Image: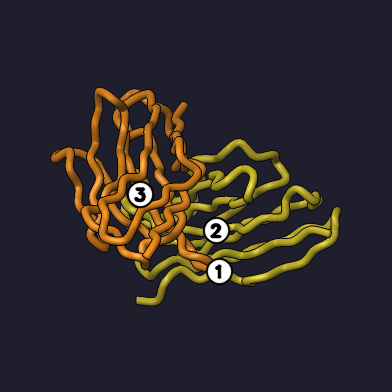
Chain colours: A yellow, B orange
Amino acid sequence: KAGVTQTPRYLIKTRGQQVTLSCSPISGHRSVSWYQQTPGQGLQFLFEYFSETQRNKGNFPGRFSGRQFSNSRSEMNVSTLELGDSALYLCASSFTPGQGAGEQYFGPGTRLTVT
Amino acid sequence: AQSVAQPEDQVNVAEGNPLTVKCTYSVSGNPYLFWYVQYPNRGLQFLLKYITGDNLVKGSYGFEAEFNKSQTSFHLKKPSALVSDSALYFCAVRDAPYSGGGADGLTFGKGTHLIIQP
């Protein structure tokens, strides 16, 4: 099976712009989670989706949003970018239907740089 | 609320020696516990998990971890370290559904750099 894919892999944006990141989960996986990884804060949970519904949301401002489509692909959007949004954004998919016991399979991440 | 602590930023071990990477957690209900590894310029890879049952769980690449409920710990261990084990290791936790905790996503520790010296 193909792994989790994320596009684009690298992105450079300017403060105030918005950005959309895409994630395609492993075939058959219906749960998708997003994380932000920075040297200072480590790995922080953004949101989790299952069957097109957001099940959990981390402690991030409303500028961060996401959605999941019927084919389980997911997108996250960050509006009004700030310098502090520069990070590696990781997507992970899981087979277990939303109960949380399933291990997550991570994509390679999208490296976002805000200038 | 749930949290994870990895008290050591870095652990240095000589090749062939046993290794331990420490993790303690806090959850409101029963924990689901995970270990992941991140190699340079690569995504995270799943190593092992504790959901229920036997306190000693075995995972990939010869790693194992012991769940200790009284000490709220889930330390990662390997009997004989390899240079190729050098990487960044993350412990993660979430509340089990319907166990009294909140419906939060997965919470990760800050990570521990494991350095295996030849």
- Name the residue that disc number 3 marks: B35
Measured along the vertical axis of the image, is residue A112 above or below residue B89? below
For the C terminus of chain A, the image quarter is bottom right
Q: Is residue B112 left or right of residue B95?
A: right
- Name the residue that disc number 2 marks: A90
Q: Secondary structure at mark 1?
A: strand
Give the number of the disc on residue A6: 1
Q: Nearer the viewer, mark 1 or mark 3?
A: 3
Q: Secondary structure at mark 2?
A: strand
For image coordinates 50% across by 71% down, the residue present is A5
Going from N to C along the chain, the mark reached first, 1 or 2, is 1
Kindly indicate whether the residue at mark 2 contacts the one at mark 1 (C-beta within 8 angstroms). Answer: yes
| Chain letter of the residue carrying label 1 | A
For image coordinates 46% across by 55% down, the residue present is B88
Measured along the vertical axis of the image, is residue A82 above or below residue B82? above
For image coordinates 80% across by 49% down, the residue present is A82
Q: Residues within 10 Å of mark 3 (few under 14, many from 20)?
A: many
Q: CA distance from mark 2 to mark 3?
A: 16 Å
Q: Quadrant of residue A74?
A: bottom right
| Chain letter of the residue carrying label 2 | A
Q: CA distance from mark 1 to mark 3?
A: 22 Å
The amino acid type, in three-letter code, at marker 3 is: Trp
**Residue B39, position as x, y percentages in the image:** 46, 64
For the N terminus of chain A, the image quarter is bottom left
